[in-house]
Amino acid sequence: MKNNLILISAVLLTSLNFGQKLHLYGGNNHEVYLGCLNCTNYESDSIWNEYGTYGSSYNSKSIWNEYGTYGNEYNSYSPWNSYSNDPPVVVDKAGNFYGYFTLNEYKSNRADFRLALTIYKHHEHIKEDVGEWYEKIFE
């Protein structure tokens, strides 16, 4: 287990070097901001800040809220719906598109960079303790 975590950390550190912050947008026409994907856990808009809007398991705009629109595995706007055709998108500040953030492996233009793939693989565990997983992945 420890070796797997070391490997995950090493792989993901390289994925952070996009040169810009990556953001999630979801909902109808992807107009709802869902947080920053590769920000630190101290930034207020980070999905890794468990006390912030987008990292909280209780906030309606969090992908970690399993009862909310964007965290519910049965909602078409959720990245955790394996059949969704309308999942969140990953974009940078300039609006450059990095793919759809989704478990749906058949969705064309699915985000497939290392960080996204790791989150897909471990999302069930991540939502249980976002802070712990931030440390495992990024530190």
Image (tube, rainbow, N blue to C red):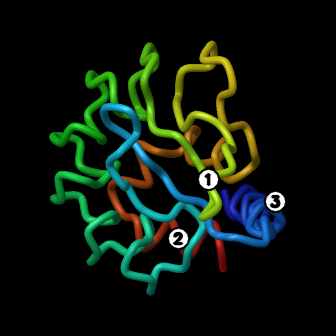
- Residue under the image location 46 percent in, 71 percent down: 132
Q: Amino acid at mark 3?
A: Val
| Secondary structure at numbered mark 1 | loop
Q: Amino acid at mark 2?
A: Tyr
Label whose residue precedes the other's in the sequence (2 or 1): 1
Q: Are marks 1 and 3 in contact (CB under 8 Å)?
A: no
Quadrant placement of the C terminus: bottom right
Query: Number of numbered discs present?
Result: 3
Mark 2 lies on residue: 134
Q: Are marks 2 and 1 in contact (CB under 8 Å)?
A: no
User: Is the residue 106 above or below the residue 45 in the image?
Assistant: above
The x, y position of residue 54, in whole percent, is 33, 63
Indicate left or right for 19 with 110 as reference.
right
Measured in 3D between alpha carbons, the distance from the residue under mark 2 to the one under mark 3, in whole angstroms, is 14 Å
Measured in 3D between alpha carbons, the distance from the residue under mark 1 to the one under mark 3, in whole angstroms, is 25 Å
Crowding at dot 2, Cα within 10 Å, few <14 / some 14-19 / many 20+, comes out as some
Snapshot quadrant of residue 92: bottom right
- Residue under the image location 84 percent in, 66 percent down: 14
Q: Nearer the viewer, mark 2 or mark 1?
A: 1
Query: In this view, which residue lies farthest toward the bottom?
Result: 42
Quadrant placement of the N terminus: bottom right
- Pick the residue in front: 97 or 10: 97
- Residue under the image location 43 percent in, 49 percent down: 125
Crowding at dot 1, Cα within 10 Å, few <14 / some 14-19 / many 20+, comes out as few
- Pick the residue in front: 95 or 109: 95
Mark 1 lies on residue: 95
Mark 3 lies on residue: 11
Q: Amino acid at mark 1?
A: Gly
User: Is the residue 28 above or below the residue 12 in the image?
Assistant: above
Indicate left or right for 125 with 6 as reference.
left
